[in-house]
Amino acid sequence: MGSLIRAFNWAASPVGDPAEWPQALRTIVRLILSTNHPMFIFWGDDHICFYNDAYRASIGSEKHPAMLGAKGQEMWPEIWPIIGPQIDQVMSGGDATWHEDQLVPILRHGSIDEVYWTYGYSPIDHEGTIGGVLVVCTETTQKVLSERSQTEGLERLRELVQQSPGFIAVLSGPDHRFELVNDAYQELFLGDTHAIGRTVADVFPEVAEQGFTALLDEVFTTGRSHFGRDMRLGILATEGRESRELFLDFIYKAIRNPAGEIVGVFVDGYDVTERSRSANALADSERRYRDLVQNQTEMICRFRPDGEILFSNNAYARAVGVDPDKMTKANVWDFIKAADRPAVEASLARLSPDMRQVRIENQIQTPDGARWTLWTNSAIRFGANGELQEAQSTGIDITERKRVEEALRESEARFRHLSDHAPVMIWVSEADGQCVYRGRSWYELTGQSVQEGLRAGWLDAVHPEDREAVASGYRTAVEEQTSFRIEYRVRAAEDEYRWTMDSAVPRFDEARQYLGHVGSITDIDARRRQEDLKSLLLDELNHRVKNTLAVVQGIAQQTFRPDGDVRSMRASFNARLHALAVVHNALTRAEWGKTSLREIAEETLALTRQSQNRVEISGEPAELGAGAALAIAMAFHELGTNALKYGALSSATGRVSLTWKLEPQDPSILHIIWRESGGPPVVAPTAYGFGFTMIKRALEFNVGANVEMNFDPEGFQCTIKLPLGGV
């Protein structure tokens, strides 16, 4: 939360820039960020929200992170009728508030959740006034529900005890004073006599001589339980009860406190006086129960921890392929697959007086091979020390379900393998339009995590200029349950955007119920770039052809004059076209990018240097764009031609020096100097011929260069100042 608070644009909120926050707000924000206890701040009249990481754990995505810096009433509309008055009380100078286990339902995880809180609202002092409210809170939902459940459980237990058909009593202390008797005990032994708070000897003075008091003393002293069966009890008549003779089955069990000390005796038993009359009915009931168990389709087996089978029904015997009459000589461990035995042993080890039932899936050996079963293992009997002495397992055959689950896992694994290794990016959405699966290729391309790429998060990787169109097209396809295809750009992991084509079709179940879409995304970046390059090349070719024709047209117009010699004009025209071709070749090799000035000079003046070997070219590395290269090449050609015809190269001793460098005073200007020496005396012309005219027009008008021509008698010099914008 510290990072979110620092990154938040507070300047655009009512709180303002953090640098201008009141000291009270700064201090309290640092406080909540430095504690692991859930805390919240409502600041100012708008109740602007601040909270820490511990508080964030109690709210859902509906609130976080949108709640940071937002107005409290706007973020908590569902509970504002509860907390709004409490906040106003504190803000208006009233007392701080404290609420324990308060029900405050909030919207989280898509629904209104019944949440209990223990919280307090405290004022935050700001220059003598109340600047805000500090909320210190703890969610107590689990505690409240647990206490409620525990209370309800105790109440249910009390009701069960009271409603139990067996008689139950709780006796406390060495004198065996009644603390509790259930309805059955009251009706059977007491009638209208009140026993709570009185001792057994006081209520039943006659039981001492019958041995019951001695048994209670022994249990209280030794802690060993006593089981009585068919014990005779004679009750004398008193006011409120009749004399009776009863036969009882019962248990006396010591009651211990948390320290292990014996503090009383628990009495539980049944009146079996009518046992003789009900023996036959009980036998019939037992036979019916046995028949029911034997004919059940579920497998039932009762056994000891060492595996000795005490009872099994016919379904179990059939499953393991053993004669039912011989099952009591078998061992349950012989039928459990060896690989599953440790898990079954661990499952049984979990049984205790407090956990009397566990479930486990394991395989049993049958004549047809191993079959999967789901067992409910129940504890039947424990020893005095709590050790398991007898258990019963009830099982059903789940082999077919396991086969279906395995087939489903294999099918899903095949799908994921296919999706992860396909040349396209596979994705699947649900009927609500939320994406629930994306193939590994998507995450490798975009660098998103699985959590970021699911639901609607994949749209974050779409180019901002394409996002709305993609989202709109996808929404329409979901609403109309139709196919769609769209091309858009996706941000790759290297922070560059690549063109993709997304194609999807709706998917339906057998009842034609819409389930969502399944789609594939293909990387078409290379194709789109080729298309763009093709278009660019066509445009460039059209531009170059037009420019070249314009240059040729200009050369022709300047070369062919009505009063000129046709042969001479043709030769000049061809030479100029050759110079144009030379620079075109250089530009083509450079793919019409930038071309070396030295390469232009050497190729344009190649014939001049070859015939005379008196042209020196030197200069620092420099590259020219296409327009500047053409203009400079034509200028070099004209200067070379004039030097051969009229200048330094027209004599045997003349030389030409072509140099260039960046001007020291202005590095944005390339300084090119053509200097002739050793030739015939130079005479300044009264008017420029075509060559010099072409030089000035080509350089000054086309690339903004400055051209100076010096007709010094010692040698002609041409200086060209070319802006780097044309280089």
Image (tube, rainbow, N blue to C red):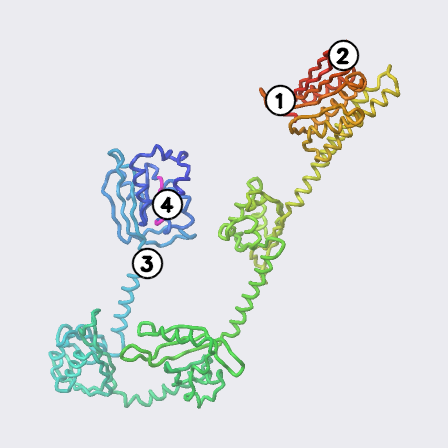
Assess disc 4: are there few (<14), some (14-19) or many (≥20) residues with their C-alpha within 10 Å of its C-alpha.
some
Look at label 2 and name its amino acid: Val
What label sits on residue 142 in the rendered view? 3
- State how far apart marks 1 and 3 are (Cα): 80 Å
Q: Is residue 492 left or right of residue 93?
A: right
Q: Quadrant of residue 588?
A: top right
Q: Residue at x 35, y 89 (%)?
A: 283
Q: Quick check: marks 1 and 3 in contact, CB under 8 Å? A: no
> Which residue position is annotated with label 2?
682
Q: Earlier in the sequence, mark 2 or mark 3?
A: 3
Pointer 1 residue: 669
- The percent position of residue 549, horizontal first and vertical second, equals 78, 27
Hey, what amino acid is under mark 3?
Answer: Gln
Mark 2 or mark 4: whose residue is earlier in sequence: 4
Report which residue position mark 4 lands on. 76
Describe the element under mark 2 as helix, strand or loop: loop
Q: Nearer the viewer, residue 707 or 557?
A: 707
Provide the secondary structure element on which disc 4 rests: loop
Residue 295 in picture, x, y percent from top left: 45, 84
User: In the visual, does 516 lie left or right of 142?
Assistant: right
* Name of the residue lying farthest toward the top: 686
Range drawn in magenta: 48-54
Tell me how many marks there are. 4
Percent of width and height locating residue 334: 45, 83
Give, as a three-letter code, the residue at label 1: Ile
* Spatial separation of the CA atoms under disc 2 and disc 4: 95 Å
